Image (tube, rainbow, N blue to C red):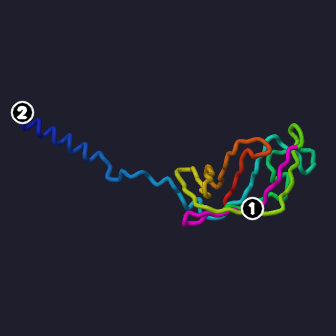
Amino acid sequence: MRPCHKYILSIITLTLLLSCSSDDTPEDSNNTDAIIGTWNLIELNISPDQDLDNDGTANSNLLTELACVSGTLTFREDNTWSIAFNGVNITSITGDLFDIRCSNFTSTGSGTWELQNNQLTLFQGFTTIFYTLNDNRLTNIIGQDLPDFRSEVYEKQ
């Protein structure tokens, strides 16, 4: 009976060894090619909605209210990024009313980036900014009300 046990033990051991994949490394879920390139700002959302262009319709997306708002994010293969942003100056008037005007200058910045799954992290000095990648869109949820922003969305060119 002893040889039978050795035979069964050998089969179990062999089965366990063969069932283990030789490729135990996780699948590369960091598709950096999806990030590399130029991304244009398509939404800069605020709350509460404002009617800045006086067309009778308040909107949360400043890009539909002010033609001067624009932004471009550029990601390079060496894991660096840069931004050029034509933003706004926001002043609280009273209650939910704000004076929102085009700024007179273009803000720029740069740093390094890292992609883990669909989470993109931008590093700029001591500042860290988080975006979620969904197809050809990057979304940063800021989650603040005016005089700050709710979110910003970039779309790949």
Q: Amino acid under label 1?
A: Ser
Q: Residue at x 89, y 44 (%)?
A: 57
- Classify mark 2: helix, strand or loop: loop
Crowdedness near tag 2: few (<14), some (14–19) or many (≥20) residues, C-alpha within 10 Å? few
Q: Nearer the viewer, residue 71 or 100?
A: 100
User: Residue 134, can we see it?
Assistant: no
82 left or right of 2? right
- Classify mark 1: helix, strand or loop: strand
Span colored in magenta: 74-92
Residue lying at the far front of the rendered structure: 126
Q: Nearer the viewer, residue 153 or 114?
A: 114
Coordinates of residue 8 in the picture (x, y in percent):
15, 38
Quadrant where the C terminus lies? bottom right
Magenta highlight: main SS: strand
Coordinates of residue 132 in the picture (x, y in percent):
61, 49
Residue 60's label in the rendered image is none
Q: Residue at x 20, y 40 (%)?
A: 12
Q: Earlier in the sequence, mark 2 or mark 1?
A: 2
Residue 107's label in the rendered image is 1
Task: Nearest to the eye among marks 2 and 1: give it.
Answer: 1
